[in-house]
C-alpha cells in the first residue's frame, strides 16, 4: 500500500473519527446489512462473505 501503519492510523482517524479497525468493521457491517436485505444468503454465508471468520463475532457486532 506504500503507507506506514502510523500514517494510515492518523489519516483514517482524521477522515472518519474512528480507528482503522473500527472503520473496517463498519464497512463490513454495512455490506452485511445490504446482503441481508437482499435476502438471498443465509446469515452464516453473509458473515463469511464480508470477512468475519467466526459467526459469534458477527452476531455480537451486528
Image (cartoon, grey):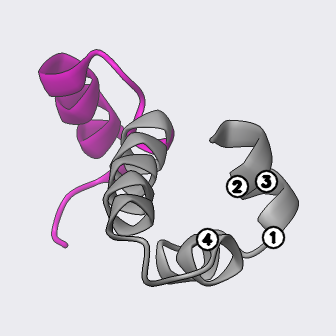
Binning the other alpha carbons within 10 Å of mark 2 as few (below 14), some (14 to 19) or many (20 upward) gives many
User: In the displayed structure, does residue 14 sit left or right of residue 48?
Assistant: left
The residue that label 3 is drawn on is 57
Q: Earlier in the sequence, mark 2 or mark 4?
A: 4
At horizontal 29% and vertical 54% (from top left) the residue drawn is 4
Dot 1 falls on a residue whose secondary structure is loop
Disc 3 to disc 1: CB gap under 8 Å: yes
**Tag of residue 58:** 2
The quadrant of the rendering that contains the N terminus is bottom left
**Placement of 15 over or under 8, stated as above or below:** above
Q: Position of residue 32 (x, y in %)?
A: 44, 60
The residue that label 4 is drawn on is 47
Q: CA distance from mark 4 to mark 1?
A: 8 Å
Q: CA distance from mark 3 to mark 2?
A: 4 Å
The residue that label 1 is drawn on is 54
Disc 2 to disc 1: CB gap under 8 Å: yes
Q: Position of residue 42 (x, y in %)?
A: 62, 79
Amino acid at each position: 500500500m506504500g503507507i506506514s501503519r502510523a500514517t494510515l492510523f492518523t489519516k483514517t482517524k482524521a477522515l472518519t473519527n474512528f480507528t482503522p479497525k473500527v472503520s473496517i468493521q463498519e464497512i463490513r457491517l454495512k455490506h452485511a446489512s445490504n446482503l441481508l436485505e437482499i435476502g438471498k444468503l443465509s446469515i452464516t454465508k453473509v458473515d463469511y462473505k464480508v470477512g468475519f471468520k467466526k459467526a459469534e463475532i458477527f452476531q455480537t457486532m451486528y
